[in-house]
């Protein structure tokens, strides 16, 4: 609830909003002071109209409603002394707990309004000042440190004796408790009665029975003495002391209930679990926020969270006023004026109503505007000076109260002008136990709560990681493991969570630098700057020896009125920045160190069996009957989880946080599965991994020791067994994922943890693919080792079944989470398995009377079905181009292999030749369909080679059909056209490849043979001559193939000439071009013979024809060229001493001559 009481507001405080006059600027005495107040919380009732008391009303007579609880006065109505209620020593902590978001960053000061006023009046007042100061980030918490009450307690309990001795030695050697005067209590009682009269409504005094006078004169001082006394808690004690002394007061103790020890460690950052962990401790320490209203007050540039109990009245033409009672015989002094002005400013009250009395008899009322208070007679003060005092005090405190977790004491003796600041924590540690400081626990709790609050937003505020770490480390410094184990465990848990092990490394230009030296990254031990005139004289270098215990000193309170006398020299040091880890291992080690500290803390809080009382043999142990259907589940589950759960999570399980534990168990099992799979995939380094695994640091041993002490169950021991067998590792990995999936399935955690469910299914699909590939490779190895013509073994068949089962389950896993890409990959692997099955049946037949078997056709068709399913799963290439192209290639290969086998090993015993040719043609065309020759990719040359080979095979098939077919002329013509078409396409594709000269030469030679076959069926000389010229033209076009062959042979010869060995020179060429010399020589011999035959036939035909055309006879020129080329060819073939390279050179020269003659003939015809 946030409310604002603005100047001139007409509504009650409870009904106002933050939007109404959040800021107001006051012009007071010519000095501009900026002030705004936002009521963040108010428990006050709607503002009541106050009663104007009649003149001569006797305030010494108590009203009838005096000391009765009144809704109009709120909490002030139950206080004998009215609105001047004594502040509790931990009032700032109560407010800090309620507004945790503002602590450490947005607010500069948190305190009671009375403390704020006392500080700002230091230069004007001779009164003593004693306040405790604590630093939480950039926020200072101020609380009154009542020395008198503290030392009274010390006299009774013996606590704080070190501070009492220190105080008497250095400050006040003759200390004694100062008692309040009768005048003080008289004024308090008069004020209280005045407030009750003001809300009575009739304005008349209504005396109470005579017994009330005794109450007035006797009971009031006594009660007020108790009410006004600060309630100081005892130093922290363990709850065991409560059991030892049941009648003792538990004030000041923070009971550590067993339910808090377990269940709140692993879940500490969750907001709903923070309050229960400390709620009892806060209440017992008096850490409640019991102010009527909490106000966010901005005074100039200082942001303060202030608690106030001042009653505010309203109604009629005075919407919001404060009531004051003054003795008419005593003029208002500066201290009173500042007090009234600051109260109205803090609460944003526009007017002050002053009631004057003489000896308790009402005289008159006077209305004073808030901005006029600084100008009252005898109470004139400068608001700008007040502003300077506030800024100087804040700068002084921020510059010197630098250590988080330390208690600082700001002290000014009565009548002194010197203000001193002491570090009580350091003084306490030098003398006694640090837990003698009652502020230790509240400060630790507040540090912890601020860190928890920031942890809730850690994903949005990664730049605060350094701040969170500093808060937690300072919290741990204040706590004792034997007294606060659960808080220490939770803090260490959060420290380990700060390190995001799976977080990618941040770039230098990130928007949220974790190690940035921003204001949020303050240091727990900032440097103290040396003394200088402009920084204020709070150095103790020239102080008397007795003052060497002071951290800093203000030598004269008058300095506080000097503008900017004290400047904040609080510097940020990078020591608190988030530590930079140079690798995942270093980060893991740091996390484990925090985990270990947390485990130690929890271990210390859990009673061991040896601590339990021995059973009395004479006393029977009561047994409770439980139905088996309702028992055994969680207990059994606890035993199964014990191996994997660290102590924190085990405690959570005991506190009925079963779903979180189950999720954690799933994560542990998944991690074990990942590790087993990685070991299987890196078999070469298995020995090194085992050595690293067996090596244990001291931290590892302590963590394992803590775990084994609580866990004796070995249900999941198999998950961490490191086997050297590959199949066993894969099997254990799969078992881990299956166990994790079953936990999610049977505990109904899938909906609550969808990401975990998807990850587990992905891993299950992946491991089943790995196992399927493992069995498939084993089957292929067995097939390779099998003797030819031997039947398929039972071992192979079992391996096929195992592999297929794994692939099938993996596909189901991926399809259940709509992972089409991975499902397509597993379908592709299943297709590969079918091809291996087909190859196994192929090898079983042997080469004798080999035919393409039905089993081969069955498995190849199954493989095709799986590849087509994979394509349907992907839908389109854009979904995943690489996988799409891979599936297309495998499908094309399967069609091509099946067609090749049918073509090479035609099943003529089962099918007709025409049917086989049709099936081969269809399979080849489908292979071409899925062979992408146009898309530029690393696989494009392979696709081009595949397509060229398919066209070559189809052309050869149609060529063979044409040779063997008799009768149907239409079909013969169709085959002739198809053969010529596929030969042309094969040549075009082979010419695109620079590493297949032999294939190109072979296709061209087949084209020449095809031409010769056509020429044999021709009768006319002209037709034969035309076919011959076409065949010679094909011969001439083989020049590019011979040039590639010559290039490779020349490179080889050059390497030999350089003195390199034959093996060294040949192997690179063979590896790069796969040039086979035997194949080249064979093709060259065929080429020479066919060229010789064609040249001879052309010479015969040209000689027999005596036709002449025009003046130039082209046929005679051609005849002459052919004779010359034929003669050179015969000589070259007859010379057996020519090397292969020389023979290639001869062929290239002859082809060059034929080409020139052809071009000349074409030019003449044109």
Image (cartoon, grey):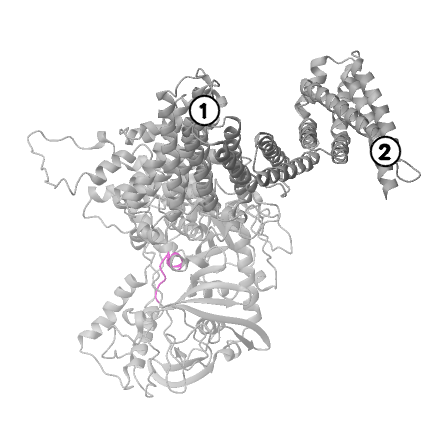
How far apart marks 1 and 2 lie (CA) works out to: 56 Å
Q: Find residue 840 and report its horizontal and vertical position in percent.
A: 43, 24
- For numbered disc 1, what is the local secondary structure? helix
- For numbered disc 2, what is the local secondary structure? helix
Q: Find residue 715 and report its horizontal and vertical position in percent.
A: 28, 30
Q: What residue is at 81 percent from the left and 26 percent from the top?
A: 1099
Q: How crowded is mark 1: few (under 14 residues within 10 Å), some or many (20 or more)?
A: many
Q: Residue 1115 carries which label?
A: 2
Nearer to us: label 1 or label 2: 2
Q: What residue is at 57 percent from the left and 70 percent from the top?
A: 384
Q: Relative to residue 961, is residue 497 depicted above or below?
A: below
In the rendered image, which residue does mark 1 sit on? 842
Magenta-span inclusion, residue 86: yes
Location of residue 1012 (image quadrant): top right
Magenta-span inclusion, residue 175: no
Q: Quadrant of the N terminus?
A: bottom left
Location of residue 1138 (image quadrant): top right
Q: Residue furthest right?
A: 1111
Marks 1/2 in contact by CB < 8 Å: the verdict is no
Most foreground residue, 1014 or 154: 1014
Q: How crowded is mark 2: few (under 14 residues within 10 Å), some or many (20 or more)?
A: some
Q: What residue is at 58 percent from the left and 61 percent from the top?
A: 559
Q: Relative to residue 558, is residue 895 depicted above or below?
A: above
One can see residue 728 in this view:
no
One can see residue 824 in this view:
yes
Label 1 or label 2, whichever comes before in sequence order:
1
Q: Relative to residue 866, is residue 902 depicted above or below?
A: above
Q: Find residue 352 and report its horizontal and vertical position in percent.
A: 43, 79
- Which stretch is magenta? 85-95
Q: In which quarter of the image is the C terminus?
A: top right
């Amino acid at each position: 609830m946030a409310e604002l009481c603005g100047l001139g507001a007409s509504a009650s405080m409870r009904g106002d909003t933050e939007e109404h006059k959040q800021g107001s600027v006051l012009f007071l005495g010519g000095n501009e002071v900026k002030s705004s107040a936002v009521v963040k919380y108010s428990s006050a009732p709607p503002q009541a109209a106050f009663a104007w008391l009649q003149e001569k009303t006797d305030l010494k007579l108590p009203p009838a409603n005096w000391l009765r609880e009144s809704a109009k006065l709120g909490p002030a109505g139950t206080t004998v002394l009215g609105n001047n209620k004594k502040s509790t020593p931990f009032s700032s902590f109560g407010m800090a707990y309620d507004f945790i978001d503002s602590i450490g960053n947005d607010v500069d000061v948190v305190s009671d309004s009375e403390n704020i006023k006392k500080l700002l009046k230091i230069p004007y007042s001779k009164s003593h000042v004693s306040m405790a100061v604590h630093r939480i980030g950039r926020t200072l918490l101020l609380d009154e440190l009542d020395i008198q009450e503290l030392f009274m307690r010390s006299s009774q309990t013996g606590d704080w004796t070190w501070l009492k001795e220190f105080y008497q030695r250095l400050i006040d050697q003759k200390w004694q408790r100062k008692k309040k005067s009768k005048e003080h209590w008289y004024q308090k009682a008069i004020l209280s009665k005045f407030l009750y009269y003001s809300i009575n409504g009739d304005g008349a005094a209504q005396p109470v029975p005579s017994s009330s006078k005794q109450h007035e004169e006797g009971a009031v001082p006594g009660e007020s003495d108790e009410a006004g006394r600060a309630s100081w808690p005892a130093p922290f004690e363990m709850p065991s002391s409560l059991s030892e002394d049941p009648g003792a007061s538990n004030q000041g103790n923070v009971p550590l209930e067993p339910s808090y020890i377990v269940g709140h460690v692993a879940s500490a950052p969750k907001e709903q679990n923070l309050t229960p962990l400390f709620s009892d401790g806060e209440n017992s320490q008096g850490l409640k926020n019991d102010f009527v209203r909490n106000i966010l007050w901005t005074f100039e540039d200082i942001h303060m969270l202030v608690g106030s109990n001042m009653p505010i009245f309203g109604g009629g033409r005075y919407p919001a006023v404060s009531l004051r009672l003054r003795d008419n015989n005593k003029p208002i002094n500066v201290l009173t004026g500042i007090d009234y002005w600051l109260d109205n400013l803090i609460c944003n009250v526009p007017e002050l109503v002053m009631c004057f009395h003489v000896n308790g008899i009402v005289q008159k009322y006077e209305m004073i505007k808030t901005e006029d208070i600084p100008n009252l007679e005898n109470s004139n003060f400068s608001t700008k000076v007040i502003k300077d005092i506030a800024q100087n005090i804040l700068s002084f405190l921020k510059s010197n109260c630098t250590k988080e977790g330390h208690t600082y004491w700001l002290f000014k003796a009565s009548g002194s002008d010197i203000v001193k600041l002491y570090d009580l924590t350091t003084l306490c540690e030098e003398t006694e136990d640090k837990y003698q400081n009652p502020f230790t626990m509240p400060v630790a709790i507040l540090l912890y709560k601020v860190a928890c609050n920031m942890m809730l937003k850690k994903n949005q505020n990664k730049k605060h990681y350094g701040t969170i770490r500093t808060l937690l480390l300072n919290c741990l410094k204040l706590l004792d493991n034997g007294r606060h184990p659960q808080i220490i465990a939770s803090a260490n848990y959060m420290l380990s969570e700060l390190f995001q092990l799976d977080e990618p490394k941040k770039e230098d230009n990130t928007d949220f630098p974790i190690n940035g030296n921003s204001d949020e990254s303050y240091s727990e031990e900032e440097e103290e700057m040396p003394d200088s005139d402009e920084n204020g004289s709070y150095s103790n270098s020239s102080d008397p020896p007795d003052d060497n215990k002071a951290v800093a000193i203000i030598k004269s309170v008058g300095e506080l009125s000097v503008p900017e006398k004290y400047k904040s020299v609080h510097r940020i040091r990078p020591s608190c920045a988030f530590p930079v880890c140079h690798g995942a291992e270093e980060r893991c080690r740091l996390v484990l160190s925090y985990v270990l500290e947390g485990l130690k803390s929890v271990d210390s809080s859990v009673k061991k069996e040896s601590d339990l009382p021995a059973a009395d043999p004479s006393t029977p142990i009561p047994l409770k009957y439980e139905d088996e259907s309702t028992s055994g589940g969680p207990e059994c589950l606890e035993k199964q989880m014990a191996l994997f759960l660290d102590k924190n999570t085990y405690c959570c399980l005991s506190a009925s946080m079963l779903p979180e534990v189950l999720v954690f168990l799933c994560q542990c099992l998944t991690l074990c599965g990942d590790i087993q799979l990685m070991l299987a995939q890196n078999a070469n380094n298995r020995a090194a991994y085992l050595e690293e695994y067996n090596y244990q640091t001291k931290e590892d041993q302590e963590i394992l020791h803590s775990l084994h002490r609580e866990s004796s169950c070995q249900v999941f021991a198999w998950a961490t067994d490191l086997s050297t067998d590959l199949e066993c590792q894969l099997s254990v990995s799969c078992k881990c994922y299956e166990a994790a999936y079953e936990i999610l399935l049977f505990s109904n955690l899938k909906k609550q943890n969808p990401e975990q469910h998807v990850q587990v299914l992905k891993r299950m699909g992946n491991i089943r693919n790995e196992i399927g590939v493992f069995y498939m490779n084993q089957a292929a190895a067995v097939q390779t080792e099998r003797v030819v013509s031997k039947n398929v073994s039972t071992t192979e068949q079992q391996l096929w079944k195992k592999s297929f089962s794994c692939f099938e389950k993996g596909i189901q896993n991926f399809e259940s989470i709509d992972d089409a890409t991975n499902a397509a990959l597993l379908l592709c692997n299943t297709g590969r398995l079918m091809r291996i099955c087909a190859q196994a049946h192929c090898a079983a037949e042997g080469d004798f009377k080999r035919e393409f078997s039905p089993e081969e056709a069955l498995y190849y068709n199954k493989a095709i079905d799986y590849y087509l399913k994979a394509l349907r799963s992907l839908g389109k290439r854009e979904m995943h181009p690489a996988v799409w192209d891979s599936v297309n290639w495998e499908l094309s290969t399967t069609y091509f292999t099946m067609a090749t086998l049918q073509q090479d090993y035609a099943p003529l015993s089962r099918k007709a030749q025409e049917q086989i040719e049709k099936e081969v043609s269809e399979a080849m065309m489908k292979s071409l369909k899925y062979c992408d020759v146009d898309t530029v990719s690393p696989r494009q040359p392979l696709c081009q080679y595949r397509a060229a080979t398919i066209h070559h095979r189809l052309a050869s098939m149609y060529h063979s059909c044409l040779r063997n077919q008799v009768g149907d002329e239409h079909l013969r013509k169709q085959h002739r056209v198809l053969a010529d078409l596929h030969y042309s396409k094969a040549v075009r594709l082979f010419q695109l490849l620079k590493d297949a000269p032999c294939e190109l030469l072979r296709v061209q030679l087949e084209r020449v043979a095809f031409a010769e076959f056509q020429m044999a069926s021709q009768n006319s000389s002209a037709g034969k001559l035309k076919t011959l010229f076409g065949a010679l033209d094909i011969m001439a076009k083989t020049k590019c193939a011979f040039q590639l062959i010559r290039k490779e042979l020349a490179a080889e010869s050059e390497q030999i000439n350089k003195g390199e060995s034959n093996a060294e020179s040949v192997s690179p060429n063979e590896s790069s071009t796969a040039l086979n010399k035997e194949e080249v020589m064979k093709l060259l011999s065929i080429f020479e013979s066919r060229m010789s035959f064609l040249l001879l036939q052309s010479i015969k035909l040209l000689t027999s024809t005596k036709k002449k055309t025009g003046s130039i006879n082209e046929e005679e020129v051609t005849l002459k060229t052919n004779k010359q080329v034929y003669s050179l060819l015969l000589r070259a073939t007859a010379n057996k001493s020519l090397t292969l390279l020389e023979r290639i050179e001869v062929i290239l020269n002859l082809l060059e001559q034929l080409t020139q003659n052809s071009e000349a003939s074409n030019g003449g015809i044109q």
